[in-house]
Image: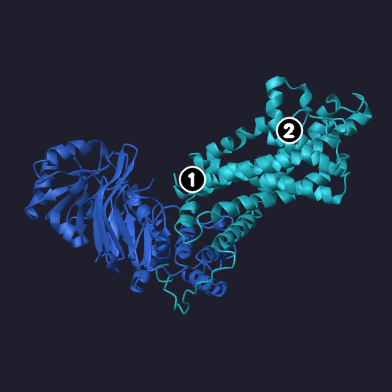
Chain colours: A blue, B cyan
Amino acid sequence: MAKDDAVHAEGLVKTFGEVRALDGLDLVVPRGQVVGLLGPNGSGKTTTVRILATLLKATEGVAYVNGFDVVKQSDQVRHSIGLTGQYAAVDEFLTGRENLKMFGDLYHLTPGYVRERSEELLEWFDLVEAADRPAKTYSGGMRRRLDLASSLIAKPSILFLDEPTTGLDPRSRLGLWGVIESLVAEGTTVLLTTQYLEEADKLANDIVVIDHGRVIAHGTAEKLKDQIGGDRLEVTVVDPGKIIHAQLALAPVFGGESLVTESTISGPVSGGSTILVDAIRTLDNSNIEIADIALRRPTLDDVFLALTGHGAEDETLTPAKSRGRRGRR
Amino acid sequence: MTSQLQPPLSTSTPEAMKRPLLGWTLHDSIVIARSTILASFRIPEAIFFQLIQPVIFVLLFAYVFGGAIPIPGAEPGTAADASLYRQYLMPGIFGQTVAFAAAASTVGLAEAMQKGIIDRYRALPMSQSAALIGNTFANALRQILVLTVLSITGYIVGWRIDAGILNAVYAYLLLLLFAYTVTWVGAYIGLSVPNTETANTAGLIWIFPLTFLSNAFVPLDGLPGFLKVFAAYNPISSLVLATRELFGNPTGYPPGAETGYWSLNNPILYTILTCGITIAIFAPLAVRKYRRASRR
């Protein structure tokens, strides 16, 4: 049964000296599905992908990819997968076309096929004009596309995308999402790690939330949101210096722990729209000016906070780290 | 942009190559070596500086120190002595230059590691030693260009090949073997250091004492006891002495004289032996490091 899934991992443990990067992680990716592996930095996402991609040996546990044991049948695993990491791993002194040729040759594909497939990929990824320029001259988005194209040269049935859009501008990110969606439409299985909750929400059928090397929640985005239930009240104050006062003032309004960033507080509430009036009155009494106030459905950010006790971006939420810059490193 | 990136009407089906006669390791190594050489030609500045450094050494030693270093067989301080020193010097510069080939390998692999290219290679169904074999081979091949430029520079300052073409070819081959050997050591260091910044210094630091504690620039006679022994068994000394003999250049010893060390009495054999042993040790070590490598 383990062998029918695209990815099947059980009880993965990985220790680096004293650090337990993975602490008994189980993961199943059914064929043709997109599973999003979601977690903060250091939660074990990359370690998991590296084990599945045969780059790292687990200290304990077993993993099968495309039915093959990642340790004993690593060569067969490598034939089945494509891997795109956080860093655009292409040779920057080679041109786009030369990179594709090199990787195609290393997959042991015939020169004729490599040529044909390279043209296809260059066209698809909008790299035809840049194909004969060294990758060094490419923009971040173009490099990432070339990186992804390189992992698609052998048409792998399983694709590991380790934070594929980290550091990309929003336009390039949207473009890459489009690519991933069409790959999935063609039947590719994708395991995606991300710290962008929005990304997991958009792309993944199934989300696995991990923290400290363990799965802490698992389900569709909707299911995870329902799990923490209720509406959220989100208040943005005019003066970020008063954010702590606002948090204190609003404490009785929230039905649970609130999440604070630079100038925004959000927290679970119950009681519908009258709660808005309460909140406005409370803040007004404390002389705190409101820039924006809204009731909304929980986001995966809220899910994350509820599950882990900290936000998706960091262990500690410092005021300096605004929401707009989350996830950048 | 989203709308532009439509999936292609893919008509191609992956066709696997037949296993080549000599196996995948050779095939993959050639692919890597080809790409490495191709890539290095895209950085003309790097090639320029790789070439200019030994040329500067030739000029420095030939014209600045040359007159002050006596070579047995000539009167000190005479014009004949200076030109004799240039004959003596060139094989030393050749030896030093090929030793520095290791540094390029160290930096190259540390960079490939940091950029995640090694991760990508390792996730491919390619031979696990090919990336290193290809890389070290490309680095050694690059030395052909360096040795050519250096030989021309030598010719200009008065260096001559004096023992026939065939012997000269042996000398160049020995130099390339040595270059290939040290690139394995360099590769191992490159895979062991935590980042490229460290690679820049760690790649060079061991080569300096090794080249200067040898007969590359001065005859061994002037060295104090224990350093003399170290220098005599230093493979750079045997390499340089062997190339001096093969090029027909002054060796720093009177003809037919005993050097007092087995390594220097049989410099070609000793050089080939130490190269073989070094590769036998460092190639498996480097491949082992590579297989466990992870981007840092």
Reading the image, the residue beneath label 1 is: B289
Above/below status of A123 relative to B221: below
Reading the image, the residue beneath label 2 is: B262
Report if residue B97 is visible in the image.
Answer: no
User: Residue B107 sits in which quadrant?
Assistant: top right
Label annotation for residue A170: none
Q: Is residue B49 left or right of residue A90?
A: right
Residue B236, position in %: x, y? Answer: 71, 36
Q: Are marks 2 and 1 on the same chain?
A: yes
For the point 47% across and 68% down, the residue is A153
Which numbered disc flags the more N-terminal residue, 2 or 1?
Answer: 2
Q: Is residue B190 left or right of residue B146?
A: left
Mark 2 → mark 1, Cα distance in angstroms: 34 Å
* Residue in front for this viewpoint, B252 or A266: B252
Q: Quadrant of the C terminus of chain B?
A: top left
Residue B208, position in %: x, y? Answer: 66, 32
Amino acid type assigned to the residue bearing label 2 in the image: Trp
Q: Secondary structure at mark 1?
A: helix
User: Residue B266 sits in which quadrant?
Assistant: top right
Q: Secondary structure at mark 2?
A: helix
Amino acid type assigned to the residue bearing label 1 in the image: Lys
